Amino acid sequence: MAPTMPTLRPLSCWKAILRRSRLQKAATRTLTTYYKPKPIDATPTVKKKIKAIPPPPTAASLFKEPIKSVTETQVAILDPTGARTKLFSKANLEAAHVGDILLVRLKNGDPFAGVCINIRRRGIDTGILLRNELTRVGVEMWFKIYSPNVEGIEVVQRKEKRARRARLTYMRKPKHDMGSVQNIVLAYQRSRGALRGNTEINSNAHENKGGKRKIKGKR
Amino acid sequence: MIQLKTMLNCIDNSGAAIVECVAVMKMKRHAKIGDRIIVVVQKQRNFGPETGSGATISTSAANKVRRGDLRHAVVVRTKKKLQRPDGSVVKFDDNACVLINKTGEPIGTRLNGIVGTELRKMKWSKILSLAPMHL
């Protein structure tokens, strides 16, 4: 390579030569160094095998989605028949929707009926907001649908047209307020009583003695 | 949330129609259903609509309080949501109260309107028995 190099550029020539010599130098140095290779096959045999203890089984491995499983068990306890879940499930076409008039029967206390203006779906904490007008005063009540205090929830009347909102809070405004739904509920209870039989009719007749004072009379 | 300057409806037949809260008794925060407050009568009830349901009672009872009177009262309805121990929540569309005297007896003889059941817990059974409905 060196003889073909142009004489005008001696520096590059020098560089190439020097590089070669440097390489040679390095080679000689490595040759002169004393190097005794370690016995290669000794190390793997000496290496001890550490006993790996598997981690104890944790709850996390058993329950991949703990909140979900807790909710499921709670719902199974509080709603064994699954009727309540079905009544408010989104998959069910016959489920109660916002805008329907619902009647909540309570274990201790009188039933409350009203237009459902909000369904808050939160697993076991699922609640419904009912609005009604009692003694010319608007009343709103939240009920937890899985509450042990709630004996039953009935659909009194469905909204003829599907509500296009999830929360019908506009129904609080005087323009959209449905007012009292007590008449519809009473008619429903009467019809239910007639369907059930005599005893129910009697109890309902007692219940319906005087429109407004119904609840107090029942206590 | 009944506090200073809150205007409340008075739902008894004591003669007051609208009262203003000037103090909440025995606590340093806002009043809820069943709490005792001190009110000033701002507006007297008009006798016109009352005549339908017992004119004689209302006219005689109407003299019991006058505009500007300082009275004690019990909150019976609140616009603020109130949560019950069982998780249910009750909310009314207005704030309302019932006037009482210093010993806790209601001044009016009749109530027109629903009241909260919390009154039972707070030992206002007399008001509850007067009320046409409680929730």
Image (tube, coloured by chain):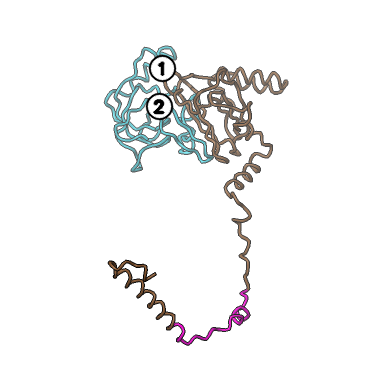
Q: Secondary structure at mark 2?
A: loop
Q: What residue would you read off at disc 2? A: B94
The chain that appears brown in the image is A
Q: State whether residue A78 appears in this view.
A: yes
Q: Secondary structure at mark 1?
A: helix
Residue A38 is one of the magenta-drawn residues: yes
Q: Where residue B16 appears, x then y in whole percent?
A: 34, 23
Q: Is residue A106 left or right of residue A7?
A: right
Q: Earlier in the sequence, mark 2 or mark 1?
A: 1
Q: Where residue A194 appears, x then y in whole percent?
A: 69, 18
Q: Furthest-right residue in view?
A: A197
Q: Amino acid at mark 2?
A: Asp
Q: According to the rendering, which colour does chain B have?
A: cyan
Q: Of tags 2 and 1, which is closer to the observer?
A: 2
Q: Residues within 10 Å of mark 1 (few under 14, many from 20)?
A: some
Q: Amino acid at mark 1?
A: Ile
- Residue A150 versus residue B44: which sits nearer the camera? A150
**Numbered mark located on residue B57 in the image:** 1
